Amino acid sequence: MTYTADKPSTAPSPEELRARIPGWGVDLDPRDRPAVPRLQRELDTDAPWVAPERQPERWPRERSIEHLMLPPVFGTTCPPKGLSGVIRRFSYARYSEGRAAHWLLLLAADRVDAVESHFATLLTGRPDNPITQTGIRSELTHHGFRSRFGTKRADVVHQGLDPFIVGGPWLIAAGALALSGRAIARRVRRR
C-alpha cells in the first residue's frame, strides 16, 4: 500500500494485521513478553536479601525529580559546594532531566566551579601555573609549532583562540585582584 495524503477509511483490525505481517502483536500477551519476568516483584533468586543495604547519605545529594530515592550505591567524591553547588541543587530541585534548562544550569555550574577553583588556588598562595599546566612550555620544547604545519590536525583551526580561552580567565582574575587592591589602598589612605 503506497502512501497517500488521504486518511485510510478504516484502520486494519489486529487479526488482519496478524495475518498480513508475520510476528505482529507477539508481545500483546504478557506471557509472551521477554521482559515480563523482570517486571514482576516476586523474583525467584538465591540472594540473601530483598534489597541491597543502602549506602548512608552523609549530606543531601542532588537527585532528579523523577526519582523517589537514590540508588543503593552512589558516588560521593565531589559533594556540591559553593555557588556552583547552589546552582546544581536548584537545577535538580526545579527542572526535570528532560528539560534543557536542567542541563544548561549544570553546564553553568561547571563553569562557576572552574572559576571558584581558580580563586581557591589563588588564595592558597600556590596558584596554578598556566605556562606548564596548559602545555605552552611543551609547545616550545617538543616541536609543537613544527607539528602544526603540513598536517591535518583538528586543533590547527582553533589555535588562534587558545590564548584567549586559556589566558582570558587569568587576565580577568588578575585585573579584578588589581582593582580590589587599588580600592583597598584608597580606603586605607583616606583614613
Image: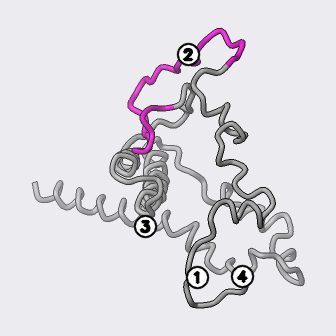
Chain part drawn in magenta: 44-70
Which label sits on residue 158?
none
Q: Please name the residue that numbered disc 1 is placed on.
A: 8
Marks 1/2: CA distance?
56 Å
Choose mark 1 or mark 4, whichever is in front.
Answer: 1
What residue sits right under mark 3 in the picture?
Answer: 172
| Category of crowding for the residue at label 1, using alpha-carbon neighbours closer than 10 angstroms: few (below 14), some (14–19), many (at least 20) | few
Q: Helix or strand or loop: what does disc 1 sit on? A: loop
Q: Is residue 125 above or below residue 178?
A: above
Question: Which mark, residue 53?
Answer: 2
Front in this rendered view, residue 156 or 85: 85
**First in residue order: circle 3 vs circle 2:** 2
Whether residue 23 appears in magenta in the rendering, the answer is no
CA separation in Å, label 1 and label 3:
65 Å
Circle 4 is placed at which residue position? 157
Q: Quadrant of the C terminus?
A: bottom left
Q: Tag 1: residue type?
A: Pro
Residue in the foreground of this view, choosing between 189 and 36: 36
